[in-house]
Image (cartoon, rainbow, N blue to C red):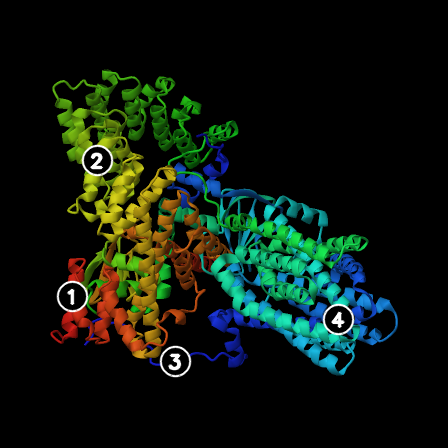
Amino acid sequence: MSTPPMPVGPLIHLRTLEPFRTLSPAQLTLLTLEAEEVGFTADSWLVRPDDTIDSMFMVVDGFVRLVAGGRSRTVGPWSLVGYPELLLRDSAGLGIHAETDVVAIRLETDALRELCERNFGILSALLGDMGDRLAAHVDRLERSISAEGAPIRGPYQGPLDRVGRMVALQRARLLPSESMDALAELADRVDSIELLAGDRLHEMGATATDFHVVCAGAVELRAPGRPVLLLGAGATPGLPETLGSVGYVHEVVASGDGTVLRVALDPFMDVLEDHFELGYSILGLLAEDVVVASASEAERSAGG
Amino acid sequence: MFPYEVALPNPNPDARPMLAGINRATLRLLSLSGRIRPDERRDVLGAFLTLFAFMAGHALLETARDALFLASLPARRLPWVYLAIAVVAIAVGRGEPPFVRRFSARNELGGWLLAASVVTAGFWFVAGRDGVWVLYSLYVWSGVIVSLIVVRFWTILATRFTVTQAKRVFPLIASGSVVGAIVGSGAARIVTAFLEPRHLVLAAAAAFFVASTAPALLDVGDGGGQRSRRWSGLGEVSRTIWTRPYLLRMAGLVLLATVSFTLIDFVFKSVADELVPADELGAFFASTYLAINVLSLVVQLLLVSWLLGHFGLVSAVVFVPAVLMVSTLGFVVAGGLTAAVVLKGADGGLRHSLYRTGTELLFVPLSERLRTQVKGVIDVVGQRGGQAVASILILMLLSTPAGVGTFGAIACLTTVGWLLVASGLKEHYLDVFRETLHPETDRRGSAFPSLDVASLDTLVATLTAPEDRRVIAALDILDAQRRSDVVPPTLLYHPSADVVVRAFEVFISGKREDALEITPRLLSHADARVRAGAVRALSVMAPDRAPLEEAFRDPDARVVGTARAAFVACGWDADGSVAKELTRLAADSDASVRHAVASALRVRPASELEPLLRGFLADSDTEVVREAVAAAGALGTPGMVEPLIRCLARRSLRDDVRFTLTRFGSLALNRLAEALADTRLPHSIRTQIPGAIALSGSATAPQILLRHLRDEQDGLIRFRVLRALGRWRREQPNFPLDGTLLQGALVQAVSTAFDLMQWRHTLTAGAATSPRRDTELHRVLVTLLRDKQDHALERAFRLLNLQSGSDEYQRVYRGLHSPIPQSRAGSRELLTHMVMPPLREPLTTLLDDLHGERDPTVMSGGERDPGVEYLRAVAEIVSCGIESASSVAAAHATELQLTEVAAVIEGVPPVSAEHAATLARAARLLSGLEVA
């Protein structure tokens, strides 16, 4: 059976963008078929600042200005805008304004979600990219949420049998508790570890292959030249690096007695493949962190 | 003591925020049958009151109008009035003042009602004067306002509610119309007993004034200019309607319905005019309309929701013309005042209840833009155009000796036409929902669409792009498309080693011998990866000992390994010494060397090196294994199948492994079938086998998979089998599958989902009555049950897909999970028409439950003791066979000290060792043998 000619231009552009660089040509083709080329005249809004973002745009020609939180910057051809914001639960706040006539490739939220559901490879690539992005900001982000080792959702100090592991997992900040069936399955595939003060969980720089969920106690995140970070129960040290398959950003050491669950990448991804909703929710949660961290970074840069 | 460290229950769960603003009695009324959700109440109340007050006023006005008109003028004049109403309604709708567009939708509606009140009061003022023009004007006015205001009213509501919500709330809102009409006609009956009919006009004006205040309660968006586009470009709107079969049929339906209603009305009034004394007409009409409105209310409250719920919207819409057809036939046969009243009763009883609700619901699935564009035209032109057509028909017949029976016969014929149009609406109605679902792109993962000339030009141009990654992207696409012929050999001179290495792969796969001229020069390239690439290319396209032996002395082990592997593959290693050296080199070197060797074997397989390749397939480095998998596929010897199957445990390689296994044909399929049945095989491998079997494309694959769907004990593997069958089905949509087996699995999935739902509601209700049950484990269990219910439904949809051979159910399932309410509602509506009884009711119940469309208290066990029900539910969950739920339920039983569950726990056959340990611990804790 012959297939119609493919729109090859967008396909090449997509392949050059970070979130999609690891996709196969066939997956890119699927993505391209869902995307459409759109044009905007100069001085018009692609997305108004108060509107919810329901699409991302790959700028092919022209320049757009991104307006968020009182700051703005202009980007040109081959930029991806509206991503990861379109993954957020409340994505209002980013305005995208055409400074010149603009030609862009648009991909809508629903189309992206459906592509991810139909083709786990695409979701997997997006998770990897988001983990990679977050790993670059993880220090700043964890500092803002760690509250000096205080538990995020309450420590879990009971037995870590299957039920205990389920309870502990659903308290983790980056694992959405509404996907309980998936977490129950994940509980079967994690190892519980009793920690003594000084036990090392991650070696800084080593390629991340697993992350931990702190159930009780706290862990220290250490990196040369930076103050030690203390993370309490509910934290997931190493999650961004593991998804991004990059080196651990910190050395992670138990600050005292405690318990953690070790989650290896492969079984974790297996569970996500069977439970799309969990994977897509995690992608959204990571995207929120990336946006918060990027905004914080931009604020810091602006402050000099 | 309870061992699990979980959060304490909420000490005061009954402290719920009070609902302010609307009193409880009103809320209770609006929550009839639990159909109205809290977030809908304000809108429903506003809509109900608006319609109630307006229709009460309209009933008063209608009674006054008919009594005044027929007391002074013969019924033969009525067609002229109908015609005038049609002309004026269309003209007024077409000529809407531009300033109106500045108002919000609800303010516009309120404004129109206020204007109606003022003008109607003016009619009361002039109604006592002589002159038939007042009677004609009053008649026309009453017809025009009902058209314009009712159309605006329902258009506003259609933007507020999804089709699922509309099916719940529209019957209740529409009952406002009927109740209003009853109150209005009742009031008319009382007023006419004491006062002249003309004073009813003033009462109508007062009712319209009251109605004008009610839209303030509506919480609808400000449509502004967009909302008022309905009349812009009548020609364009007409074209839109003409080109869409659904809209065309709807217009036809409204037109034929109106022709029928007008003819029936004329028949009724002609008979009344002839048989009822003029001075009794006011009382006669008031009494008849009151009775009809009561009937309409009964229909609205008892019949509409039932019909919509049990037979669907389209069937409900067909019901009206069917009844009217029988009634008109009855009148034609029997004649007389009684038959005319029965006919009018059928008309009035259904028109403002079932017909109105059904017609408005037919508009809801349209996009807001389309609905705004066409609804006004279809309603006003359809209704008033229908009235005009009927009027002309009546006028023509009046010029002949035809009696009232002839009018009845013609009305019967138009109801037949209406019935036919309504019957043909179903498929088009469903198509509207199909359009709203995100289209399934007809592309398979491995398929790659063909390139046209322009695309090839773009790709070739990209090969000269300054960014390496764009050049590589273009090469990837050309390679996947097998169009290496357009890649110029000069690309091997590219400054980037990454590009050159990729270009070599493209030339090798395309067997591009013209690249050979440049290749030898690259044997001395500065980058070892390029040198290795050159060796690989030469070994395939121009095998020659000399350059390979020269490469043995290369300073980089990757080049040496590549050259030795190529040397052996070319058959020049007679004494096996090079193979031995290569094996030693691979063992002593880092992963990059093993990767290079595996790459060489991928392009030039060597059976002599099969043991080495087997070792690579178990390598710790993923990229080495990836190359080895491809090399194993190229080698194709039976000994490769087993190690390849073991590679399925490595998730990043699975796609490569599955595709490679397909190259081994039935040999791999047989071995995969054995592996799937082998429960000793690691779970991580077994779970991947169904996907590999499906990919084989063999006709025996579905038999193997279906067997496991029936017999497999492991739930995850059953799910993977189901998914694999779906993948296989997409490739072979017409291949017959065992229907009985699929139906059995489907019933099982739905039944499981029902159990999960019932347990969840029982637990929720139990926790609501006793706060001590509302623990963290309770919430974990409730969330788990809900999630599992959703997954059981997903399995049901996958099975429906398998049964049907299409992917439509999958699209519906995705639509049900869309973040967009309209998509969810559209999917649900589509599903109710796609699934036949007996599965339809349970499936929609389960979906409504998950998506908040059903009142959970209905499911929670009714009046039975919540404590006993809670205990029963926990015990049933413990023994349900779902490991996770069973474990949590057992733990929950121990925290609540439900000692009665101990015996149940002891009798449960454990699913796994850990399950056994959890149950045993729970049993010990409950029987006091262990203290945590």
User: Which residue in the protein does label 4 denote?
Assistant: B276
B472 vs B733, nearest the viewer: B733
Label 1 vs label 2: CA separation? 40 Å
| Mark nearer the N terminus (2 vs 4) | 4
| Mark nearer the N terminus (4 vs 1) | 4
> Where residue B823 appears, x then y in whole percent?
49, 55
Q: For the residue marked with disc 3, what is the amino acid?
A: Asp
A107 vs B838, nearest the viewer: B838
Label 3 vs label 2: CA separation? 61 Å
Label 3 vs label 4: CA separation? 63 Å
B291 vs A230, nearest the viewer: B291
Q: Which quarter of the rendering shows the C terminus of chain B?
A: bottom left
User: Which residue in the protein does label 1 denote?
Assistant: B907
Do labels 3 and 2 touch, CB within 8 Å?
A: no
Asked whether the residues under marks 3 and 1 belong to the same chain, the reply is yes
Q: Which quarter of the rendering shows the N terminus of chain B?
A: bottom left
Asked whether the residues under marks 3 and 2 belong to the same chain, the reply is yes
> Where residue B371 appears, x then y in whole percent?
62, 55
- Dot label at residue B14: 3
Looking at the image, is B636 positioned above or below residue A152?
above
Label 2 vs label 4: CA separation? 89 Å
Chain letter, disc 2 residue = B
Identify the element where label 3 is drawn. Answer: loop
Q: Quadrant of residue B120?
A: bottom right
Indicate which label's residue lies in the foreground, 1 or 2: 1
User: Which residue in the protein does label 2 denote?
Assistant: B670
Q: For the residue marked with disc 2, what is the amino acid?
A: Asn
Identify the element where label 2 is drawn. Answer: helix
Residue farthest to the bottom, as pictured: B194
